[in-house]
Image (cartoon, rainbow, N blue to C red):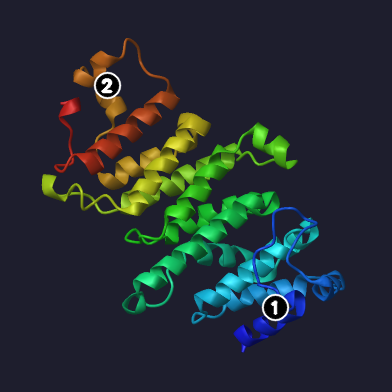
Amino acid sequence: GDAASLRILKCCLFGNARFTPPPATPNAGPLDETGSRLLASLSSAEGLLRSLTAMVVADDGISTSTISDVMKFLRLLFVSPKTTESFVALPNRMAEKFLITLLLWEGGPESTRTSAAVGTSSKVRKNMHDLILSIPLLARHALPWLIGALDTVDVNSDATADYFDVLKKLVCADDEVSRATGMSMKASSKELQALGTAVCKKLASCPRPTSDSSLVDAATGVLCGCLKLLRALIENGGGDALSVGAGLLVKDLKVSRWSELSSSGGSLGSLFSSKPKKSDRILIDLMGAIFDGFLSPCGSSSVVS
């Protein structure tokens, strides 16, 4: 029913023209004259936005082709900042659920995922990735949503690359990006710390190697995504962004704090001429936890012995 309605709406707006995503320029697009008039006649896009979003959020059986049509409509509607504001303000966290669902989209049940289906699912994730980063208002709202969703990401999933890449790009957004978009895109220190804590918690849940032969098997997409995010956090927030997360990771992995070993006369202590600052100790502990937890099968490192 929803897919049929979407096709009818598509014909009304685009006529017989090929239904393709509109260009980035606001004044150009594939709409014919009738479609342009119909779109301009919308006094409020909220109802249409709610219907389009609900098709994805509320229908577990939605096809990838229908999702593609929904996203093309949204890209067209988001040409108007007012419409984007209406989207992020949809009730019941609909916009948040929509973004997370499609950014981690894997298609139907695993038993039905053919190579072609895997390819189309990958395109859905990439299109959502690009849509978020192309709409500044959407990107600004997406950061806390993506941080909150990290706990639910399956550590065994192979469909997380676009999710982690969006997060990394949002963390790395600087003042120059803010000036270019006319909107503050730089993550706050509170957001960086929240993400740092969430990443460390997710790292602690990733599979750990039990022997030298299992080191490669333990390297999952989620693990790699978390490590890339940690680098971005260190470069943009320093040790302060990981002040809570590093401690949780050390505790959950049951490994030693390298910062304490560095001051106890061990071999690591010889690397420092004076006691490291607090922010540096956080990073030392983080580095030690990753090394002992994921690179040392026995869970302890000869570096600090």
Q: Amino acid at mark 1?
A: Lys
Residue 141 screen position, x and y as percent: 65, 53
Lower sequence index among marks 2 and 1: 1
Q: Nearer the viewer, residue 281 or 102?
A: 102
Q: Residue at x 74, y 53 (%)?
A: 25
Q: Please give left or right for residue 214 compared with residue 146 in the image.
A: left
Residue bearing the label numbered 2: 262
| Residue 211 appearing in the image | no
126 to 227, vertically: above or below: below
Q: Nearer the viewer, residue 178 or 97?
A: 178
Amino acid marked by disc 2? Ser
In the figure, is residue 115 to the left or right of 43? left
User: In the image, residue 168 lies at what x, y percent?
Assistant: 50, 44
Nearer the observer, 123 or 304? 123
Q: Residue 2, located in which quarter of the rendered image?
A: bottom right
Q: Residue shown at 35%/61% (left/top)? A: 157
The kind of secondary structure element at disc 1 is: helix
Q: Mark 1 highlights which residue?
A: 10
Label 2: element kind: loop
Quarter of the rendering occupied by the C terminus: top left
